[in-house]
């Protein structure tokens, strides 16, 4: 198996492989890397944490449903399905937000790679594939056991394959939806003048982080048949993508009541729109943004009143320069993301 | 031969480089001079293909560089003014990456990198992270990366920046040696003394426009000036430097 993978990898163009390797771990943390870093080991540890979480979840599900027949109630099953999809979307979103600055080639990449005989599209594809690979690894690791357990509980042996396929398609579609959405946001923002983009990008990154975490913890629990059927909840459901994909899973698994159809349709539309938006974003980056990153300066000297001041000015101190504001926001978002990353690792270690 | 034909670059409508035409022949070192903001680096970036020109044509060995940009880049080595490097890599790793991206054979490239690092006095630090390198060490890595594939066209934008005296002397000789071996060398620097020693001809830019393009000896005789510094001052320096220096000294003294 390993040899087959190696053979397949060797068939890829050398430039792509070199750049992919170069970009891969920059998705996680630039400082911990080297071209000779133990990439499989590093990614293995990352996947290990998620697999452990998934295994505990899957084992808990299997044991719970085996011991207590009452858990087989539709409301409990729906609650489990929705929670799994919602958690997957949170993880996918957080990984995309963490790799926010590494999805598109930056000024350094452009300055280093442009004089080399490397086509811009190879750089762009290597970048995107590297960030998508980490996301893919997370999707597989996080659903490896829990997805299998859910398929066994829902379909038993006879329907295992269908439900497994439905589940995997749903989690992949949900992840692609979020990844594409965030890629599109970045791509559209990158159309702005570069200095404005850099300022806005850090704010958007931290806003996206906040939205993802707060949506996960604060969204209303509507995963019972009664709550889903209530017309007054439909307005909320229109804005909760994890419920769209929950409905999509049930549609694909063949267990969806007709009242779910509109939610599943939203998932299909969201998925399609997100893929198109991401593709357009990449195209824009290739045709417009990559060249702009070299031509337009990152930062300019501070001038009063050019934008909102983000930090209070004490005494006679001058206001924070755009550079320091930019760095402060970057640091803030980076620290928040690293703290979240560590929290997840600790929770996984404790459980 | 490298040839620029009426090359212009406008940023937001403002010309940074305005209809510049000159040629840099093989076997000679062409010095590219100009005050800060005169458009030297912009021209270099246009020659490397880093930025698009607004108008004009750039030819190398008689062919437009746009005809086959990848083939052109394979024949070009560029030392940029800004030392952009992947700081998380070591010098050896960075050069290995560049060699791989240039498609050089692995073993030969590895020996070549080792040799270059040795000659550039970086061998002891070859496995240290570039983040810990001094400015001069970074500059040496950039020089090694630009020469690794034995390019026909060598573009050097402020290559002496951060180098110590010994390394500067080596680089000075290296530039001449490369020109003697038939390479096209375009070399931009503020060190007029070095340019005068190294270059056979100079191109002087002022406010994005070409103000001189000739051999140093011919410029000296035409302008009846003894040094390149005097020629440069007359063509591209607007201020009275001595009076300006006096004003600064007076200001800080007050």
Image: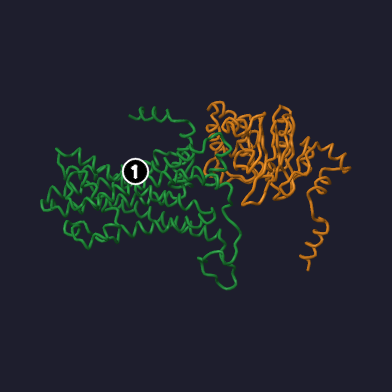
Chain colours: A green, B orange
Up-down relation of residue B219 to residue A309 (above or below): above
Residue B182 appears left or right of B106: right
In this rendering, the count of numbered labels is 1
Disc 1 sits on a residue from what chain? A
Q: Is residue A111 visible?
A: yes
Is label 1 in a helix, a strand or a loop?
helix
Residue occupying the point 50% across, 44% down: A105
- Please tell me in which quadrant of the rendered image residue B162 appears: top right
Q: Is residue B137 visible?
A: no
**Residue A272 vs residue B85, the one in the foreground:** A272
Measured from the top left, where is residue A166 in percent x and y?
23, 42
Residue occupying the point 37% across, 48% down: A179
Residue at the far left in the pictured view: A69
Measured from the top left, where is residue B135 in percent x and y?
63, 46
Residue B236 appears left or right of A335: right
> Where does the N terminus of chain A fall, quadrant-wise?
top left
**Residue A240 vs residue B53, the one in the foreground:** B53
Residue located beneath label 1 in the image: A47
Measured from the top left, where is residue A14 in percent x and y?
48, 31
Residue B115 appears left or right of A229: right
**Other-residue count near label 1 (Cα within 10 Å), few / some / many at <14 / 14–19 / ≥20:** some
Residue occupying the point 53% across, 61% down: A325
**Residue A54 vs residue A327, the one in the foreground:** A327
Residue at the far right in the pictured view: B224
Up-down relation of residue B34 to residue B59 (above or below): below
Up-down relation of residue B75 to residue B167 (above or below): above
Residue occupying the point 27% across, 46% down: A54
Residue A195 appears left or right of A248: right
């Amino acid at each position: 198996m390993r040899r087959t993978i190696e053979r397949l990898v060797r068939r890829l163009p050398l430039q792509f492989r070199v750049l992919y390797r170069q970009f891969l771990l920059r998705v996680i943390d630039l400082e911990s890397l080297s071209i000779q870093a133990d990439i499989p080991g590093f990614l293995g540890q990352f996947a290990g944490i998620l697999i452990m979480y998934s295994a505990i979840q899957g084992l808990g599900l299997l044991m719970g449903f085996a011991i207590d027949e009452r858990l087989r109630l539709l409301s409990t099953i729906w609650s489990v399905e929705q929670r799994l999809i919602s958690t997957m979307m949170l993880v996918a979103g957080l990984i995309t937000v963490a790799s926010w600055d590494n999805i598109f080639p930056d000024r350094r990449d452009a300055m280093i790679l442009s004089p080399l005989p490397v086509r811009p599209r190879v750089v762009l594809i290597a970048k995107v594939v590297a960030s998508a690979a980490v996301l893919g690894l997370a999707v597989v690791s996080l659903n490896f056991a829990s997805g299998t357990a859910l398929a066994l509980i829902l379909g038993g042996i006879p329907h295992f394959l269908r439900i497994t396929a439905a589940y995997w398609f749903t989690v992949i579609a949900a992840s692609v939806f979020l990844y594409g959405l965030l890629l599109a946001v970045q791509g559209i923002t990158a159309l702005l003048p570069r200095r404005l983009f850099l300022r806005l990008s850090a704010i958007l990154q931290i806003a996206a982080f906040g939205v993802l975490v707060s949506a996960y913890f604060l969204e209303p629990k509507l995963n019972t048949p009664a709550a889903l059927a209530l017309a007054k909840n439909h307005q909320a459901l229109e804005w909760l993508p994890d419920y769209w994909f929950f409905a999509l899973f049930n549609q694909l698994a063949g267990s969806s009541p007709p009242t779910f159809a509109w939610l599943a349709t939203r998932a299909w539309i969201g998925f399609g729109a997100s893929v198109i938006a991401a593709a357009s974003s990449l195209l824009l980056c290739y045709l417009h943004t990559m060249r702009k990153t070299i031509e337009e300066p990152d930062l300019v000297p501070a001038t009063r009143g050019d934008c909102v001041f983000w930090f209070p000015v004490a005494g006679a101190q001058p206001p924070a320069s755009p550079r320091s504001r930019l760095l402060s926001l970057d640091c803030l978002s980076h620290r928040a993301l690293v703290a979240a990353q560590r929290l997840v690792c600790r929770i996984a270690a404790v459980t | 031969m490298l040839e620029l034909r009426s090359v212009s670059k406008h940023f937001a409508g403002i010309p940074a480089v305005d209809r510049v035409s000159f040629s840099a022949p093989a076997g000679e070192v062409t010095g590219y001079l100009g005050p800060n903001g005169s458009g030297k680096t912009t021209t270099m970036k246009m020659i490397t293909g880093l930025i698009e020109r607004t108008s004009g044509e750039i030819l190398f060995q008689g062919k437009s560089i746009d005809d086959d940009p990848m083939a052109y880049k394979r024949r070009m080595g560029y030392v940029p003014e800004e030392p952009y490097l992947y700081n998380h890599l070591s010098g050896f790793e960075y050069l290995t990456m560049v060699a791989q991206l240039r498609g050089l054979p692995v073993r030969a490239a590895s020996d070549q990198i080792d040799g270059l690092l040795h000659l550039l006095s970086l061998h002891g630090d070859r496995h240290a992270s570039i983040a810990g390198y001094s400015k001069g060490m970074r500059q040496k890595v950039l020089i090694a990366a630009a020469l690794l594939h034995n390019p026909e066209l060598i573009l050097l934008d402020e290559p002496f920046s951060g180098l110590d005296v010994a390394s500067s002397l080596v680089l000075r000789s290296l530039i001449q040696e490369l020109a003697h071996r038939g390479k096209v060398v375009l070399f931009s620097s503020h060190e007029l003394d070095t340019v005068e020693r190294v270059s056979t001809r100079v191109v002087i830019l002022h406010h994005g426009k070409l103000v001189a393009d000739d051999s140093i000896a011919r410029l000296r005789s035409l302008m009846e000036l003894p040094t390149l510094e005097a020629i440069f001052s007359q063509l591209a320096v607007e201020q009275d430097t001595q009076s300006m220096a006096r004003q600064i000294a007076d200001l800080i003294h007050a």
